[in-house]
Amino acid sequence: MVKTRNLNANKQAFFNTTRAFKKSLPILMGVLMLLALADTLIPKQTYRLIFSGNWFFDPLMGAVLGSISGGNALTSYIIGGELRHQGVSMMAITAFIVSWVTVGIIQLPAEAVMLGKRFAIVRNTVSFCTSILIAIVTVLTIGME
Amino acid sequence: MIKRAIEKVGFGEAFLLLAVIGYVVLGIFDFALLRNVLCVLTRLIARIGPVLLIVFVVMFLTNLFFENKSISRFLGKGSGFRGWMVAIAGGIVSSGPIYMWYPLLSDLKEKGMRDSLIATFLYNRAIKIPLLPMMVHYFGWDFTLALSIYMVLFSVVNGVIVQRLTQRGAEG
């Protein structure tokens, strides 16, 4: 009898998980398709052309670029490393790296559907602002240019 | 009319359909470019496949072993310091793209997880332990350490602000 109860619990848990997953799959697939499109259509060199050296404008642009980009965090480190070689300020690069992972404009529709529209908008806006703040305090702490 | 159509087919399906239409339009104008995009998409799916499997297993185990009450105790209103620690540690150790974790978080939210802890979890996903050596290589030890510490601190600030702005109060 205990065995039957366990089997039923397993079945129910599996059913609930599958149902939740089915609901998410079309959105996840749509996000992946958009990411692949953005990855192919936006050349990596574009990032280099945008930074002007302005200490206020650069972190802001870094955060904007990071927010609209997406994909593996490793890519953001590689682009950040390249930008550093080009002489772009660390504040801009830090804002770029942080917002790359914490803000997701491409994923926003998926986040809104699954976690609520208000939550998604508020979380991404707050994360955008804190990415600039983190960039400022990190660079000030270690004294990098 | 568009709103009614979206309501009929569901937002997820409409979103996917829009992406497919975008691909078809791209294919009509530049088939070679579409082929490149499809290659990137295939690589992306192959990379996230295992993570998706992990998420499925974690969701299954959560459904199997945790009742709504126990999830509320760990991540709900009265979770306190332990809740923050679970959200921070969970965010740091979770792997794969952020959107892979939405289904699980949506499930936990329905079971009583606070918005502040969801935001904190998502923020801490920016700290990737396996990628830290790469960050050190590009930007040095002091930068990596300072950034990681600030990320954890700001994740809590982020969670508190999100909780307040979603108008559910500090308690959530």
Image (cartoon, coloured by chain):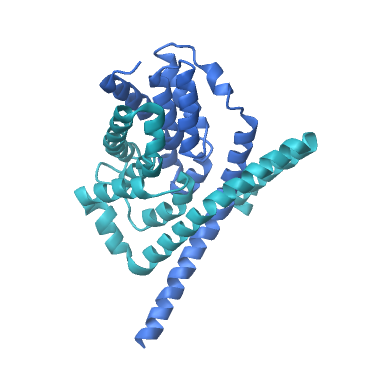
**Residue A19 in sight in this render:** yes
Q: Which chain is blue?
A: A
Using residue A121 as the reference point, say whether residue A42 is left or right of it.
Answer: right
The residue sitting at 42% across, 65% down in the picture is B60
Q: Residue at x 41, y 40 (%)?
A: B131
- In the rendered image of this protein, does residue B16 appear above or below residue A137? below
Q: Which quarter shows the N terminus of chain B?
A: top right
Q: List the single residue furthest toward the right.
A: B28
Mark yes or no: residue A127 visible. Answer: no
Is A105 located above or below residue A15 in the figure? above
How far across and how far down the image is residue A61, in percent?
Answer: 47, 20
x, y percent for residue A17: 47, 64
Work out whether residue A10 or residue B90 is closer to the camera in this orientation and state it: B90
Which of the chains is cyan?
A: B
What is the x, y in percent for residue B121? Answer: 35, 45
Return the residue nearer the eye: A32 or A8: A32
Viewed as shown, does residue B135 lie left or right of B157?
A: right
